[in-house]
Image (cartoon, rainbow, N blue to C red):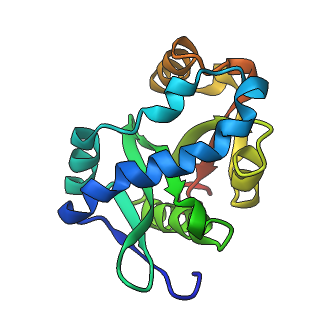
Amino acid sequence: MPENYTIRLARSQDLEHLPKIEQSAARTFSNYLEILQFPQELLDRPVPIAKLKQAQQENMLWVADDRHNRPIGFAYVEKLGDCWHLEELDVHPQSQKQGIGSALVKAVCDRLTEMRISAITLTTFRDIPWNAPFYQKLGFQEISFSECSIELQEIVTRENQQGLQQDKRVIMGYHSPSSLG
């Protein structure tokens, strides 16, 4: 884990800070809008607080705190059938490139293994360095659309309808070591 940072399950008082973190992190995509062919409006829509609150209550939301105990990143997971789906991972730009995103993903994957959940999936951009290549380094592998559960196919279809071009995206999965064998 990075020095001067802690990863923990979210508390209710964290929720008000998370949309600001998400919107700040989303600005890192601004230079890629033309390449990715998606509208600016998608960057301005944070996860609804109601979803974050539900995730927090279900222990499906992790927060990274700085050394002053202020949230600077988070990972939000949803249940998707027998698996989990990493719906959102954000680190404030001032705290990026310090291993915090990796630490958040590791915390989620560790919990996945503890709970004997078979896998976690996500969708992300194929060619953005802090997207698919980042997750590949953490053990995620590409999954074809035809291999996906119906629930995951619905997520991909919904994202496509919202303007996230499927040919620019990749579906990835991580299998819990406890589920292999």
Query: Considering only vertical position in the picture, is 73 above or below 20?
Result: below
Q: Position of residue 69 (x, y in %)?
A: 35, 80
The image quadrant of residue 100 is bottom right
Residue at (66, 37) in percent of width and height: 30
Q: In the current view of this chain or complex, which residue is farthest to the top?
A: 161
Taking the image as shown, residue 8 lies to the left or right of residue 73, namely: left
Query: Considering only vertical position in the picture, is 166 above or below 134?
Result: above
The image quadrant of residue 171 is top right
Residue at (75, 24) in percent of width and height: 34
- Name the residue nearer the viewer: 176 or 123: 123
Q: Position of residue 157 (x, y in %)?
A: 54, 15
Quadrant that contains the C terminus? bottom right
Q: Position of residue 154 (x, y in %)?
A: 48, 18
Taking the image as shown, residue 75 lies to the left or right of residue 96, namely: left
- Name the residue nearer the viewer: 76 or 147: 76
Camera sees residue 59 = no
Taking the image as shown, residue 1 lies to the left or right of residue 88, namely: right
Q: Position of residue 122 (x, y in %)?
A: 57, 40
Quadrant that contains the N terminus? bottom right
- Name the residue nearer the viewer: 66 or 151: 66
Query: Considering only vertical position in the picture, is 157 above or below 127?
Result: above
Camera sees residue 63 = yes
- Name the residue nearer the viewer: 162 or 116: 162
